[in-house]
Image: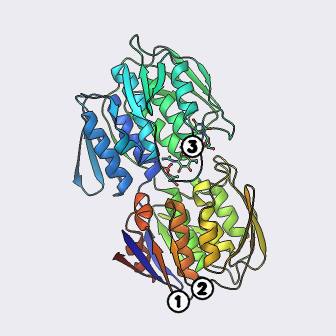
Amino acid sequence: MDVFKVHGGTSLSGKIRVSGSKNSALPLMSASLLASGTTTIKDVPVLSDVLFMQKLLGEIGAECSRNEPHTLSIDAARIYKPYGDYEIVRKMRASICVLGPLLARCGRAEVSMPGGCSIGTRPVDLHIRGLRELGADIRISKGYIIAKASKGLKGKKIFLGGPFGSSVLATANVMMAATLAEGETIIESAACEPEVVDLANFLKTMGARIYNAGSPEMRIEGVPELRPTNYRVIPDRIEAGTYMVAAGITGGELEIDNCRLDHLGAVSDALEKMGMVIEKTTEGCRISSGKVIRPVDITTQPYPGFPTDLQAQFMAMLSIAQGNSVVTEKIFPDRFMHVPEMTRMGALLRKEGQCTIVNGVPGLTSAPIMASDLRASAALVLAGLAAEGETTINRVYHIDRGYEKIEEKLNKVGAEIVRESA
Ligand SMILES: CC(=O)N[C@H]1[C@@H](OP(=O)(O)OP(=O)(O)OC[C@H]2O[C@@H](n3ccc(=O)[nH]c3=O)[C@H](O)[C@@H]2O)O[C@H](CO)[C@@H](O)[C@@H]1O
Ligand SMILES: C=C(OP(=O)(O)O)C(=O)O
């Protein structure tokens, strides 16, 4: 298992390029199963999650190949096994996204209950409820979701809200299945995340009829079939937000290319309140640190609210702010695995229910620490960049799920991170 040795204390400066979005690319790859033929997706990041999805699609029968490093071709002419094996699906939450397309195209699917980051309980009841509403017969057996729709799927008005609001991947699954259903589907309480809109745009280029994606009430008119397409994935807003924090936590200045500021409204707002200056550039943005980091309260919410996937990274920066902040997690109330690790680095954090109170300290100190999940790992890298001395981060395989060459990108702008095989 690889470890990172992060030598902190240097201000970052220079230009960094954000990769294509992981959370967009993965559902797009599954959606390519909806059409017989070869779909090409550009700007697909090279990540372990993408490799897992390629493996899963390959076992289903769709051949994946990369002509260029970031261009992925998926030949879904034949599907010989509408099946998602536990050994792959347990590794990655997004693998549940093959369920809707397989059901719509083959009339049946058998997919293991998914895994993903250890960030608390992650049920799939909304996925199942949505697909059942479209007429699928679904049962759970031995950890597998077994779905059948021998007479096809039928459009319907479906309420997809759960106890924590909308669900990104349940919206994706139901939307994909509904593209080939008979008649009209309306998804109420649909997720509005940019990745959902990207998926809708992708499906539209395949011939799907989708209206109002990005609003809580989305409408889909079913069509008899979809065709393969060529498409470019949107930039990864979470990776961009992570690099914005990297500039702030090191008192530096970064130009961030391939970044959509319009997807980062709540994030930019929080950073500006913390004293950062953000300017739009043709390729993305330039972000410069203020004289001090000011505290700010953050509450994670569905888009356009503050993203849960940046909560840990912001906590790292708030831990050295001049004052106290409250971080409230409203999407995954237990997503605080980074708290004990940051505490080992001298952060003053007190968890109370779904909040963590952050008492800003003048600086962090290095320590051996353990990455527990993807975004917690990124947050620990950021904390390591700000800390005096050398921080050793164990289990960085988590970070390889969602950040392409993070150490190379950060080292180019002045960081000192060494990857070692332990
Ligand atoms: C691959 C991918 O895109 N992952 C993202 C996606 O995950 P994912 O789509 O799995 O997250 P959801 O949007 O579904 O989760 C939102 C909330 O709904 C709950 N819920 C979800 C499904 C369900 O059937 N029942 C239910 O109660 C969840 O426990 C959570 O409290 O959105 C999350 C929230 O923005 C992000 O943190 C993840 O990075
Ligand atoms: C939680 C994440 O991923 P997943 O949903 O695949 O676990 C993430 O991208 O931060």
Determine whether 281 is above or below 387 in the image.
Answer: above
Q: Reading the chain from its start, which is encountered first: label 1 or label 2?
A: 2
Q: What secondary structure is marked by label 2?
A: loop
Q: Reading the chain from its start, which is encountered first: label 1 or label 3?
A: 3
Determine which residue is flagged by label 1: 389
- Are the residues at dot 1 and dot 3 in contact (C-beta closer than 8 Å)? no
Can residue 288 be seen in the rendering of this structure?
no
The residue nearer to you, when weighing 79 against 110, is: 110
* Mark 3 vs ligand 1: CB below 8 Å: yes
Task: State which quarter of the image contains the N terminus.
Answer: bottom left
**Relative to 242, 41 lies left or right:** left
Residues packed near mark 2 inside 10 Å, few (<14), some (14 to 19) or many (20 plus): some
The residue nearer to you, when weighing 270 against 61, is: 61
Task: State which quarter of the image contains the C terminus.
Answer: bottom left
Query: For residue 349, what is the image quadrant?
Result: bottom right
Looking at the rendered structure, the kind of residue marked 1 is: Gly
- Residue under the image location 61 percent in, 23 percent down: 158
Determine which residue is flagged by label 3: 122
The residue nearer to you, when weighing 245 against 134, is: 134
Q: CA distance from mark 3 to mark 2?
A: 34 Å
Determine whether 180 is above or below 320 in the image.
Answer: above
- Residue under the image location 31 percent in, 41 percent down: 56
Residue closest to the far right: 324
Looking at the rendered structure, the kind of residue marked 2 is: Thr
* Mark 2 vs ligand 2: CB below 8 Å: no
